[in-house]
Image: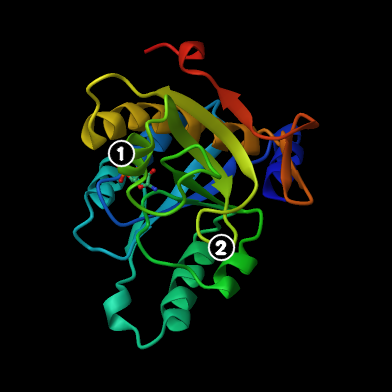
């Protein structure tokens, strides 16, 4: 997988892991990745930011950081497969090795997901496997859970499924509504997405069966709330 290849590259003094980001909206997670990659010692670099939405603010963030952008508008395609063909071409033309989904609001076909097997990450605002799908914060609050969080995982065809790389726990606090909880979770998303990419870029992540191994330890890295400054 790409992470391992990168470890070899780094030892050979070669390029950093080349990342393409797909998004549809504001791109605060993209910004966290851009900020991390701005450090030349970070083992990954973003080479393309692609959106299905030409108005996505994330595209402006990319341009501001001097990163190439592309728009592939799904409305211009008769089928999902044709839409994805153009996304795939743009990614490959840019030399992308790993794809990061960062609020990309289109469902991807099995074919596309298979083409990027163990080379495509997603961030999801829950402690998977709990609360797959939408409205995760409302559902966590309705259940009265004490601990919520977020997960970076490899993408599989099933929604919000796949080997998990990093998770962060986030406490639910008295008086929380979905917005306040989402905002707290987002602060951790901005920590774990760069962390997962760093682990991948350093060649420390492998997938055995459907479980990640980080430094040969099975299972995702899990950050507790008190582990990270806030
Ligand atoms: C985040 O909540 C992420 O977990 C979900 O989409 C949202 C994207 O937010 N996958 P942003 O565009 O990165 O601010």
Circle 1 packing at 10 Å, graded few (<14), some (14-19), many (20+), is: some
Residue 228 spot, x, y in % from top left:
47, 14
Considering the numbered disc 1 on the image, is that residue within a helix, a strand or a loop? helix
Q: Is residue 4 above or below residue 97?
A: above
Could you tell me which residue is drawn at 67 percent across and 40 percent down? 14
Residue 37 spot, x, y in % from top left:
46, 33
Circle 2 packing at 10 Å, graded few (<14), some (14-19), many (20+), is: few
| Label 1 near ligand 1 (CB < 8 Å) | yes
Residue 110 spot, x, y in % from top left:
58, 72
Q: Is residue 215 above or below residue 24?
A: above
In terms of image quarters, where does ligand 1 lie?
A: top left
Of the pair 184 and 118, the residue shown nearer to us: 184
- Gap in Å between the C-alphas at discs 2 and 1? 25 Å
Q: In the picture provided, is 39 more to the left or to the right than 71?
A: right
Residue 134 spot, x, y in % from top left:
36, 53
Residue linked to disc 2: 158
Residue linked to disc 1: 28
Of the pair 125 and 56, the residue shown nearer to us: 125
The outermost residue toward the bottom is 78
């Amino acid at each position: 997988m790409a992470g391992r290849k990168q470890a070899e590259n780094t030892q050979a003094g070669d390029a950093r892991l080349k990342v393409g980001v797909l998004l549809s909206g504001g791109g605060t997670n993209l910004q966290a990745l851009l900020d991390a990659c701005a450090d030349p010692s970070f083992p990954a670099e973003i080479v393309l930011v692609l959106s299905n939405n030409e108005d996505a603010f994330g595209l402006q963030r990319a341009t501001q950081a001097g990163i190439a952008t592309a728009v592939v508008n799904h409305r211009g395609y008769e089928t999902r497969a044709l839409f994805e063909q153009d996304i795939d071409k743009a990614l490959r033309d840019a030399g992308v090795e790993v794809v990061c989904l960062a609020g990309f609001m289109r469902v991807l076909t099995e074919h596309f997901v298979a083409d990027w097997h163990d080379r495509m990450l997603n961030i999801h605002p829950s402690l998977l496997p709990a609360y797959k799908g939408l409205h995760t914060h409302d559902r966590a609050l309705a259940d009265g859970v004490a601990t919520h969080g977020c997960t970076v995982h490899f993408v599989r065809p099933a929604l919000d499924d796949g080997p998990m790389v990093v998770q962060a726990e986030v406490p639910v606090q008295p008086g929380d509504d979905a917005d306040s909880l989402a905002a707290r979770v987002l602060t951790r998303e901005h920590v774990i997405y760069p962390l997962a990419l760093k682990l991948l870029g350093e060649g420390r992540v492998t997938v055995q069966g459907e479980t990640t191994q980080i430094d040969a330890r099975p299972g995702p890295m899990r950050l507790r709330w008190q582990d990270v400054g806030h």
